Amino acid sequence: DAVAARRAGDAVRALVPKPWERANRELLALTEENRALQDDLDRIEASITLVHGTWDPVCPHDGTIDAIRTRFPDAVVHSVERGGHNLHLSHADLVGEIIRERVDHDRND
């Protein structure tokens, strides 16, 4: 329901660092470290849900979706039309709702 989705969105917002611009620059600087983690991806045992904007200028939508589906064929993908890169900021309620639904689904499995 709408109240639960808003609460989940608030929880997502709480996880976002306040000085987002600085945090984002720091993350972009981790490109080499991210590449080094590639071998560890096969160790993931949790369900994977990707929420991705179709207008993401940082991680192009189609290539990212293809890479995720190739590596994790059981991943659940939610594409947000006209969504950009930081969906947890621009669409926090939607991201929160998707997370809540996935957690509820996994609890019932």
Image (tube, grey):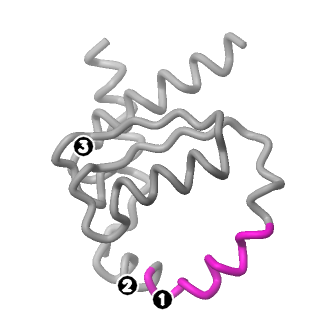
Per the image, the residue denoted by label 2 is 25
Q: Is residue 29 magenta?
A: yes
Q: Nearer the viewer, residue 19 or 97?
A: 97
Q: Kindly identify the amino acid type of the residue bearing the numbered disc 3.
A: His
The boundaries of the magenta stretch are: 28-39
Mark 3, other Cα within 10 Å: few <14 / some 14–19 / many ≥20: some
Residue at the extreme left of the image, as rendered: 82
Tell me the kind of residue under disc 1.
Ala
* Residue 34 rendering spot, x and y as whole percentages: 62, 77
Q: Nearer the viewer, residue 3 or 39?
A: 39
- Pinpoint residue 84: horizontal percent, then vertical percent: 23, 57
How many residues crowd around disc 1 within 10 Å: few (fewer than 14), some, or many (20 or more)?
A: few
Determine the residue positioned at 66% across, 21% down.
Answer: 106
Which part of the image, by quadrant, shows the C terminus? top right
- Note whether 74 is above or below 34 in the view shown: above
Is label 2 in contact with label 1 (beta carbons under 8 Å)? yes
Asked if the magenta segment contains residue 2, the reply would be: no
For disc 2, the neighbor class at 10 Å (few under 14, some 14 to 19, many from 20) is few
**To which quarter of the image does residue 2 belong?**
top left
Residue matched to label 1:
29
**Mark 2 vs mark 1, CA separation in Å:** 6 Å
